[in-house]
Image (cartoon, rainbow, N blue to C red):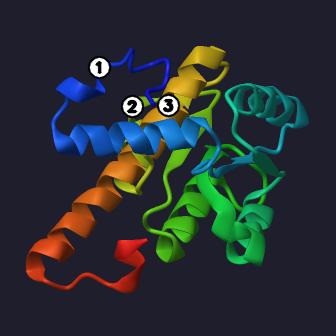
Amino acid sequence: ATGPIWNGLSANLPRGLIQRKELLRHRDCGVMTKTILIVDDDPTQRRLMRAVCERAGYPVLQADSGENAIALLQSAQGADIGLVMLDLRMPGLGGMETLKRAKSFREELPVIVLTAQGGIDTVVEAMQNGAADFFVKPASPERGVVSINNALNMTVLKGEVSRLKRRHEGSLAFKDLI
């Protein structure tokens, strides 16, 4: 069966795209949905981003500081987090340092950086430290959802490329078969 986005065109797609379509369709059905961690010291911003994420069908966890975000990512619950939306300007452990620390133990984790003031130097530094995307608050809900979907889809594609490389090298593991 095809999802509404694909309009029944999957028969004309190459095999890799059909598999990708299936991954996206399953995510839309909630099978592959990952939790989004929203990290912002401003409760109003957290509430707004939570509403956008939940309306798009994503479960949400929240942290009010960089320290709490790192603790949550390192907890058992952290394994379910598939994306982080991170404010740069926070008291204590700032967003840039939180990004660096998160990437030190979850390199594959997509992080979308949010800030009220976005200079070009800040954008470049965030991207060099591993941010998947960057936008200035307030952003439209559509911009947020597009950014989330793009980051999660890129993660799926990177995983598929890694799996195909291991298959080509003959080094597939049990997790690659599931």
The secondary structure type at the circle numbered 3 is: helix
Please indicate, yes or no, whether residue 118 appears anywhere in the rendered image.
no
Label whose residue precedes the other's in the sequence (3 or 2): 2
Can you give x and y, in whole percent of width and height, for residue 98 in the image?
A: 62, 61
State which mark lies toward you, 1 or 2.
1
Q: Residues within 10 Å of mark 1 (few under 14, many from 20)?
A: few
Can you give x and y, in whole percent of width and height, for residue 106 in the image?
A: 51, 70
User: Which numbered marker is on residue 9?
Assistant: 1
Pointers 1 and 2 in contact (C-beta within 8 Å): no
Label whose residue precedes the other's in the sequence (1 or 3): 1
The secondary structure type at the circle numbered 1 is: loop
Label whose residue precedes the other's in the sequence (1 or 2): 1
Please indicate, yes or no, whether residue 1 appears anywhere in the rendered image.
yes
Task: Give the Cα distance between marks 1 and 2.
Answer: 41 Å
Q: Amino acid at mark 2?
A: Ile
Q: Which residue ends up furthest to the left in the rendered image?
A: 168
Q: Which residue is mark 2?
A: 120
